[in-house]
Amino acid sequence: MTNTHDHHTPRAPRGRILHAAAGYDLLVWLLLLGRERAFRQRLVGLARLEPGQAVLDVGCGTGSLAIAARRLVGPAGQVEGVDASPELIARARKKAVKAGVDVRFTQGGAETLPFPDATFDAVLNTMVLHHLPRETREGCAREMRRVLKPRGRVLAVDFGGSPGERKGLIEHFHRHGGVGLQDIITLLTDAGLRVIDSGAVGVRGLNFVLATAR
C-alpha cells in the first residue's frame, strides 16, 4: 500500500472524544471492578506481544495499556499511543514519565493514523469502536491494516453481548451501544485482515478478535 496521508495536517477526527481525563481512570476502574491491571495483562497476552516488537495503541486513553505493552516489549521494542483527545494524551504522557517508560503519545483520529505504512507488529484497539460512527469505524479498520507489517496483528476488543443476555455494568454505563463480536469480525475481514482467534475476554460483555495481515 502507498501512504497518501499528510501526517502534518491530520483531519479532525469524527466520533466521540472523551475529554474528562480526571475521571477516565476512575471510570475504567469501576467498569473493571478494580481488576484493570489483570485486564491489561490479559489483553497484551491476547495480542501475543513479544520482546522487541513495535506496537500501536489506537484510542489509547490515558495510556495504561500502552505502558503495559511497553514493559512487555522491552528496551528493544517500541510503543506508540494515539487518541483524539488532547487532554487524555497529556495525562498519558505524564503517566509514562511517572512510570519511567518510553512511550510516545500523539493526538490523532482513529481513521487517519499519523504513521507510515507497515510500521507496527501489533495494533491494539480496546473499547474504541463503539465510540465511532460506522463510516469512521470502517476507516479505522483500514488504517489499522495499513500500518501493520506483513504478518502483523490487530487486537480489537469491545462489548456487545449475545441477544437476550442480561446487561452487565459496562453496557449500563455505555448506553450508546456496543459492537458485537460478529460485527468486529466482519469489520476486520472487510479491511483485508484474516481472523485467527476470537471470543470472550473474560470480563462480562467484552469480546475480542485477533486478526493478522494477509
Image (cartoon, rainbow, N blue to C red):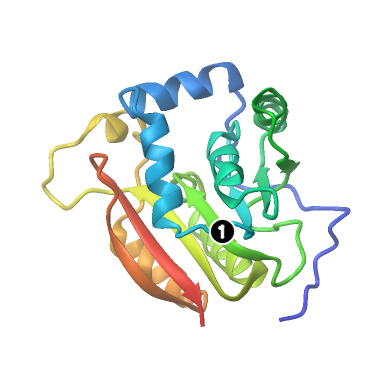
Q: Is residue 106 above or below residue 96?
A: below
Q: Residue at x 69, y 72 (%)?
A: 118
Q: Amino acid at mark 1?
A: Val
In the image: residue 200, left or right of residue 192: left
> Which residue in the rendered view is the most extreme toward the right?
8
- Please provide percent x and percent y for residue 31: 34, 27
Q: Residue at x 55, y 47 (%)?
A: 72
- Please provide percent x and percent y for residue 207: 30, 52
In the image: residue 6, left or right of residue 140: right
- Location of mark 1 (residue): 123
Classify mark 1: helix, strand or loop: strand
In the image: residue 169, left or right of residue 88: left
In the image: residue 107, left or right of residue 72: right
Could you tell me which quadrant the N terminus lies in?
A: bottom right
The one of 105 and 59 positioned closer to us in this rendering: 105
Give the quadrant of residue 149. bottom right
Q: Residue at x 45, y 58 (%)?
A: 47
Give the quadrant of residue 168. top left
The one of 175 and 72 positioned closer to us in this rendering: 72
Q: Is residue 135 above or below residue 146?
A: above
For label 1, count other residues whose C-alpha is less than 10 Å away and answer few (under 14), some (14-19) or many (20+): many
- Please provide percent x and percent y for residue 137: 52, 58
- Please provide percent x and percent y for residue 12: 74, 47
The one of 174 and 147 positioned closer to us in this rendering: 147
Q: Residue at x 46, y 47 (%)?
A: 126
Looking at the image, how many numbered discs can be counted on the residues?
1
